[in-house]
Image: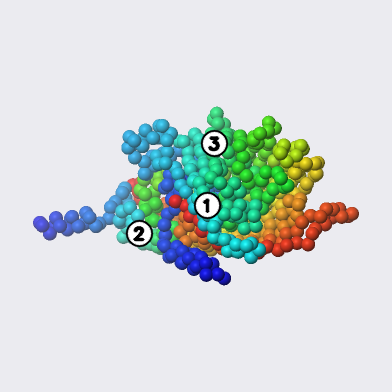
């Protein structure tokens, strides 16, 4: 029994926090999507997001936006229109170094995560 | 190079290296604190604005878009609600900007001048979404004024209020904003602070004769401005000059093709096919200013004058090209006699942005300045490095070929006195907090 309780506590502390269908890891600036919760079809997309987006900001922004449906800085609704707009914004930022294909992949991933969060 | 000069260069080098390895940090001036956004949201290298920063400024320092709804970081805290209802910013919106510049000018007695520094207080923000305000106060400046060859400090060179204005956003429910106070009239595409170099743009700082007017000077003014659709911006205003009743007037119109519009919206981009407009944006603007200066101490004549200018700003990926031109006419710039003075100033500047995120910009500027007393051709290459977002280091060289007007020849060409060459090296560091 003790082992079971200890295991449950450990899981409670370390395991993913979940929010309406998406799994995350960490908190605050280290908050990120749990790679284990990303389906194989989107693994490559997530890898692009994990490498490219954190060059300028933490993934916490993306997680909060998708979990709450509100972009954390602008306070504007974060929906499919917003994922596309942010994608274009990042494409055009001279320092993002992201290609169209990469932006498209990240937008697709965010749309998938939005759908999951809405469940 | 003297011992003192070598020490100064060594100190600056060490400072540069330390900052270069300081790692990532978020900039913290007033707007960044209020909006919990990093400098690069609105700037390439601070204080140069990017397209979104311009949209933020044109929107009276209110974040573009609809009022924040159920924001993720909103809190039911009663104190926050009280501040919101009172219209008081949650935190005091004050920040500082410090500049340390060193000039090397072999034509001066003090060839290597380190005594050029400035501390500027900046405040800005919005009262709910109704009005925006902005203040800049020169708390301390030391060093040669800008009118001298090595000058890099504000021309007043004394503690002084540079800008203090409030902008009533969407006055009476119309799309028009009403701006009042002391501010740089909306003439050119760029505020004077919106530059990378230590030197101002010649089109904004040049003066004719004894006239105190320069396009980039702050004025006591009243202005109406607003966006016409998402891609056209217009402004018009009147200026009150001290100790005279005659008012001055100006108008400005600009439009942007491609890029982020003036409402902060990104352009439509097809993610499946390529177009040159995916990355290209072109902003074009024009302005006119007319006024009258009088100075009884200098002479009995009024100087009726005008300036007419055009600007263009082209951005393609990491490449930026700026052009600015202004033509002027003064009919008594020295107040002592009717003496028409025609002036013409043109500036072209090319920039290339390096780094991911951008932390280095190389630029080259050419300036042609005919201020009716002489002609100067300036060549200014510059390297600007931002080790962290709120710190800017500038290395700049100014080559100025200057010659004086002697008058007009029979064929109406301008005769010039053989010129002088000035070569000036500048190192600057500025940081905001």
Callout in the foreground (3, 2): 3
Question: Label for residue A39?
Answer: 2
Give the image location of residue B190, x and y in percent.
60, 48
Q: Judge left or right: residue A63 versus residue B417.
A: left
Give the image location of residue A66, x and y in percent.
38, 49
Q: Chain letter for mark 3, please.
A: B
Mark 3 touches mark 2? (CB < 8 Å): no
Q: Judge left or right: residue B291 versus residue B356.
A: right
Does B191 appear above or below B367? above
| Rendered residue at 39%/35% (across/down) | B83
Callout in the foreground (1, 2): 1
- Tell me the residue that label 3 is attached to: B167
- Tell me the residue that label 1 is attached to: B118
| Rendered residue at 31%/53% (across/down) | A27
Q: Earlier in the sequence, mark 1 or mark 3?
A: 1
Taking the view exactly as shown, the residue that stands out farthest to the right is B410
Q: Chain letter for mark 1, please.
A: B
Q: Mark 3: few, some, or many residues within 10 Å (few <14, many ≥20)?
A: many
Does B114 appear above or below B169? below
Q: Mark 1: few, some, or many residues within 10 Å (few <14, many ≥20)?
A: many
Give me the C-alpha separation between circle 1 and circle 2. 56 Å
Does B106 appear above or below A92? below
Give the image location of residue B253, x and y in percent.
66, 42
Res. B273 in view: no
Question: Label for residue B41?
Answer: none
Q: Looking at the rendering, in which quadrant would you find the N terminus of chain B?
A: bottom right
Callout in the foreground (1, 3): 1
| Rendered residue at 37%/53% (across/down) | A60
């Amino acid at each position: 029994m003790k082992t079971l309780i200890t295991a449950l506590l450990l899981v409670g502390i370390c395991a993913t926090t979940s929010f309406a269908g998406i799994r995350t890891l960490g908190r605050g600036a280290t908050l990120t999507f749990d790679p284990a919760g990303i389906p194989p079809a989107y693994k490559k997309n997530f890898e692009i997001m994990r490498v490219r987006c954190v060059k300028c900001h933490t993934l916490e922004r993306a997680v909060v936006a998708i979990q709450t449906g509100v972009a954390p800085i602008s306070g504007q609704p974060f929906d499919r229109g917003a994922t596309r707009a942010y994608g274009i914004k990042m494409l055009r930022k001279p320092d993002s170094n992201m290609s169209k294909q990469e932006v498209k992949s990240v937008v697709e991933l965010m749309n998938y995560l939005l759908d999951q969060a809405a469940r | 190079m003297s011992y003192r000069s070598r020490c100064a260069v060594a100190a600056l080098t060490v400072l540069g290296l330390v900052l270069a390895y300081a790692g990532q940090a978020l900039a913290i001036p007033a707007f960044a604190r209020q909006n919990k956004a990093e400098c690069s949201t609105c700037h390439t290298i601070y204080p140069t604005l990017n397209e979104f920063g311009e949209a933020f400024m044109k929107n009276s320092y209110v974040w573009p878009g609809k009022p924040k709804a159920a924001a993720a970081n909103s809190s039911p805290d009663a104190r926050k609600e009280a501040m919101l209802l009172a219209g008081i910013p949650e935190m005091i919106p004050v920040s500082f900007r410090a500049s340390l510049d060193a000039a090397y000018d072999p034509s001066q007695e003090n060839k290597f001048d380190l005594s050029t520094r400035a501390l500027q207080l900046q405040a800005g923000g919005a009262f709910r979404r109704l009005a925006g305000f902005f203040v800049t106060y020169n708390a301390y400046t030391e060093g040669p004024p800008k009118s001298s060859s090595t000058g890099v400090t504000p021309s007043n060179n004394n503690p002084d209020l540079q800008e203090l204005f409030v902008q009533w956003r969407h006055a009476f429910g119309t799309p028009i904003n009403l701006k009042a106070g002391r501010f740089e009239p909306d003439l050119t595409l760029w505020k004077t602070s919106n530059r990378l170099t230590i030197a101002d743009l010649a089109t904004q700082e040049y003066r004719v004769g004894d006239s105190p007017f320069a396009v980039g000077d702050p004025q006591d003014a009243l202005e109406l401005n607003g966006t016409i659709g998402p891609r056209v911006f217009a402004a018009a205003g009147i200026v009150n000059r001290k100790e005279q009743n005659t008012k001055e007037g100006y108008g400005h119109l600009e439009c942007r093709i491609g890029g982020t519009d003036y409402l902060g919206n990104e352009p439509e981009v097809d993610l499946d096919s390529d177009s040159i407009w995916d990355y290209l944006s072109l902003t074009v603007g024009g302005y006119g200013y007319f006024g009258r200066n009088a100075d009884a101490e200098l002479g009995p004549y009024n100087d009726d004058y005008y300036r007419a200018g055009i600007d263009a700003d082209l951005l393609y990926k990491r490449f930026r090209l700026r052009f600015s031109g202004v033509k002027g006419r003064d009919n008594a710039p020295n107040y002592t006699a009717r003496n028409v003075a025609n002036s013409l100033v043109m500036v072209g500047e090319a920039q290339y942005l390096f780094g991911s995120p951008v932390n280095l910009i190389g630029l080259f500027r050419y300036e042609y300045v005919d201020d009716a007393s002489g002609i100067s051709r300036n060549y200014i290459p510059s390297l600007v490095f931002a080790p962290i977002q709120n710190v800017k280091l500038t290395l700049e060289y100014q080559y100025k070929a200057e010659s004086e007007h002697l008058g007009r020849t029979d064929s109406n060409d301008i005769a010039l006195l053989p010129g002088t060459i000035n070569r000036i090296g500048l190192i600057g560091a500025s940081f905001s907090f």
